[in-house]
Amino acid sequence: MSISINKISKYYKKQLALNKISFKIQKGEIVGLLGPNGAGKSTLMKILTCYTKENSGNVNICNINKDVDELSIKSKIGYLPEENPLYTNMYIKEYLSFIGSIYNIPNIKNRLAEIIKITGLTKEQHKKIYQLSKGYKQRVGLAAALIHNPEILILDEPTTGLDPNQIIEIRTLIKELAKDKTVLLSSHIMQEVEKICTRIIIINSGEIVENELISRLKKKNINLEDHFRKLTS
């Protein structure tokens, strides 16, 4: 099992952000994490990526217990946060080489060439990041998340601010990457979730209110947007 969490709870002082959250995600799945603002999506992603600590519960990533070995878990995960923090004065190859050095990647030149091709950055690779469009900056963020060849990708709003063509390009890339990885992504765009994800998990007020395959919802003629509003309003 790629991701397994059991009864995760998180408090910020006295405010309950997550309340006994449990789910599992298998290799090859693309799971959409949905919820209104403040529902706990980003908190959950930060827990999974070891950026913050849960107050109770158990997290296992690729059969590694988070309480035992956070460093190994970090090596298994590629994370693209919503704000996509990039060093914009660096050249693309310079930035990706810097990220690769953090992971002590052997044969970094070969890996750089490979990841630039995979993420469609070949024509832009000699530019500085600030010269790129929003869509290409997202590609650089994905390349940085992929540089160490992680088993799991966690993407927070990966298509935010992109135009329709850029959304299609990023969607196609994520689907291709998911063939041999596990993907957990958050989004507010219901139509995009339906097109890219195999399953949805909806969180409201820190609790899971839905965990279902997209195909099953379609068989029941359930409109995802209407279903979301019903469960979260």
Image (cartoon, rainbow, N blue to C red):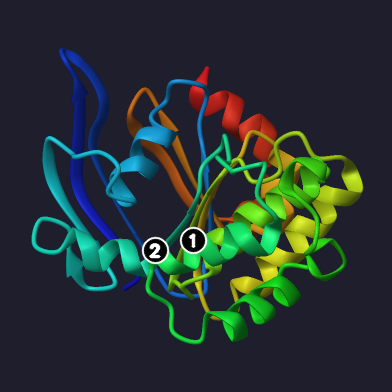
Q: The residue under label 1 is which amino acid type?
A: Ile
Residue 204 versus residue 98 in the image, above or below: above
Q: Quadrant of residue 76?
A: bottom left
For this rendering, which residue is in front, 52 or 3?
A: 52
User: Residue at label 2?
Assistant: 102
Q: Quadrant of residue 172?
A: bottom right
Pick whichever, 35 or 178, lies toward us.
178
Please indicate whether residue 87 sits to the left or right of residue 22 in the image: right
Q: Taking the image as drawn, is residue 30 in sight?
A: no
Residue 78: image location, x then y, percent: 46, 61
Task: Please tell me in which quadrant of the rendered image residue 102 appears.
Answer: bottom left
Left-right relation of 13 to 203: left
Q: Position of residue 155 (x, y in %)?
A: 54, 50
Along the line of sight, the residue nearer the viewer: 95 or 182: 95
Q: Which type of secondary structure does the marked residue at label 2 adopt?
A: helix
Measure the C-alpha gap from mark 1 to mark 2. 5 Å
User: Which image quarter holds the N terminus?
Assistant: bottom left
> Measuring 72% from the left and 66% from the top, which residue is drawn there?
173
Crowding around mark 2 (Cα neighbors within 10 Å: few <14, some 14 to 19, many 20+) is: few
Label at residue 99: 1
Does residue 97 lie above or below 111 as drawn? Answer: above
Image point 87% across, 67% down: which residue? 123
Q: Amino acid at mark 2?
A: Ile
Against 79, residue 18 (above or below) is above
Q: Secondary structure at mark 1?
A: helix
Q: Residue drawn 69% across and 58% down?
A: 92
